[in-house]
Image (spheres, helix red, strand yellow):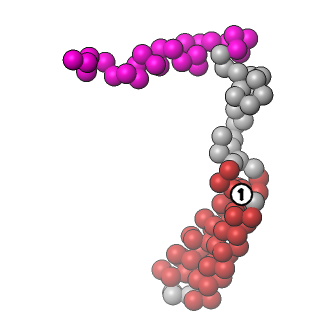
Amino acid sequence: MTDQLQPSTTGETAADPAIIGASPEDGALAHHLTGAFTPHPAFHGRAVSWVAATLIVVAFVTGGLALVFGPTWWAFWASLALAAVGGLLAIATNMFEDWY
């Protein structure tokens, strides 16, 4: 019978070079594409992706507020158009390929 008290991931975690403190010179933390150690950036994504996401969030908040305090239909439809512009910008710039 297998040892059910110890999950299989614990043994694999002990061999992970990022957890055991391997240095970049060891080659264990080498980047998978270039073969060189590259630290992760402080933030993820391109600026155009953040603009598209911000447009979409602002549009949804504005549209929601337009429905709650009114309903103010011109603000709702304008926010719907802004969300569509943000969505098209996200699709056109391939925003979903920005994660690391």
Pick the residue in front: 81 or 74.
81
| Residue 60 x/y as whole percent | 57, 71
Per the image, label 1 sits on a secondary structure element best described as loop
Instruction: State whether residue 10 is above or below residue 51.
Output: above
The structure residue drawn at horizontal position 31% and vertical position 18%, both measured from the top left corner, is 6
Instruction: State whether residue 42 is above or below residue 62.
Output: above
| Residue 24 x/y as whole percent | 71, 15
The structure residue drawn at horizontal position 66% and vertical position 68%, both measured from the top left corner, is 87
**Where, by quadrant of the figure, is residue 18 drawn?**
top right
Instruction: State whether residue 86 is above or below residue 26.
Output: below
Does the segment drawn in magenta span residue 21? Answer: yes
| Residue 70 x/y as whole percent | 51, 87
Pick the residue in front: 33 or 100.
33
User: Disc 1 designates what residue?
Assistant: 94
Query: Can residue 51 be seen?
Result: no
Farthest left residue?
Answer: 1
Q: Amino acid at mark 1?
A: Asn
Query: Can residue 78 be seen?
Result: yes
Image side of residue 100 versus residue 63, left or right? right
Q: Which residues are magenta?
A: 1-27
**Where, by quadrant of the figure, is residue 89 drawn?**
bottom right
